[in-house]
Image: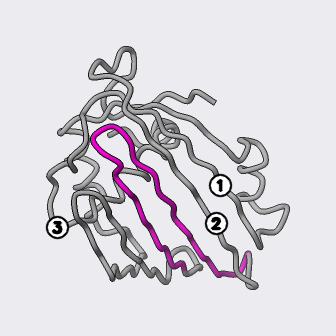
């Protein structure tokens, strides 16, 4: 998968599905492969108004819609990318639960660029063509010593087996 602006475009889709890749297998979940559309809504509490996080949310709005082409190969590539050690990160995943309709886990990270974070992720697979979930991220660090909380809700839906002009591993911002 290309990382950078394409990854930012795919963020809602990949956050919805790639987080599932934290599982013990790189086998895709029981969902259809092809073009998916994801809507994510983000709210942030505790971020200083002049912080990059608060400015990014203000510029991009709080709700984003994107499309991505999910294939078994892009699933596997993202799985392997997520398994790579992140330099300077000290992360531990706990409470992992997965079945054919539900995925959840917690992750604690420290020493990541001077901040610590904790994540709770939960995704419900509503069948082969729909999923919804949320992630709560709590961070502390020099830029926000009082702590910052980000809440992301996600809805993803399958559109087609034909990805059209959206290439696997890349994404398309709708709004």
Nearer to me, 135 or 148: 135
- Secondary structure under tag 2 reads strand
Q: Residue at x 37, y 68 (%)?
A: 86
Q: In the drawing, does residue 109 fall left or right of residue 22?
A: right
Residue 90 in magenta stretch: no
Q: Mark 2 and mark 1 in contact? Answer it, CB < 8 Å.
A: yes
Report the side of 167 relative to 13 (left or right): left
Magenta residues, start to end: 117-143
Give the distance between the C-alpha atoms of the residues marked 2 and 1, in whole angstroms: 7 Å
Q: Pointer 3: residues within 10 angstroms few (<14), some, or many (20+)?
A: few
Give the camera-side residue of 116 and 124.
124
- Classify the position of the C terminus by image quarter: top right
Q: Label 1, on which residue? A: 42
Q: Is residue 137 magenta?
A: yes
Residue depicted at x 32% and y 40%: 1
User: From the viewer's perspective, is residue 26 above or below residue 7?
Assistant: below
The single residue placed furthest to the right in the displayed view is 49
The residue indicated by pointer 2 is 150
Q: Residue 32 at x, y = what percent?
A: 24, 35
């Amino acid at each position: 998968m290309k990382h950078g602006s394409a990854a930012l475009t795919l963020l809602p889709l990949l956050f919805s599905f790639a987080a599932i890749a934290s599982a013990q297998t790189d086998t895709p979940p029981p969902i259809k492969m092809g073009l998916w559309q994801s809507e994510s809504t983000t709210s942030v509490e505790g971020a200083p108004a002049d912080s990059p996080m608060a400015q990014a949310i203000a510029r991009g709005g709080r709700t984003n819609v994107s499309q991505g082409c999910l294939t078994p190969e892009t699933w596997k590539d993202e799985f392997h990318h997520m398994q790579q050690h992140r330099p300077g990160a000290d992360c531990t995943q706990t409470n992992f639960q997965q079945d054919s309709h539900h995925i959840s886990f917690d992750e604690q990270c420290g020493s990541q660029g001077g901040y610590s974070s904790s994540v709770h992720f939960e995704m419900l697979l509503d069948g082969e063509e729909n999923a919804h979930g949320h992630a709560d991220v709590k961070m502390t660090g020099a830029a926000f010593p009082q702590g910052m909380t980000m809440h992301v809700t996600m809805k993803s839906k399958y559109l087609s087996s034909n990805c059209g002009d959206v290439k696997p591993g890349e994404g398309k911002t709708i709004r």
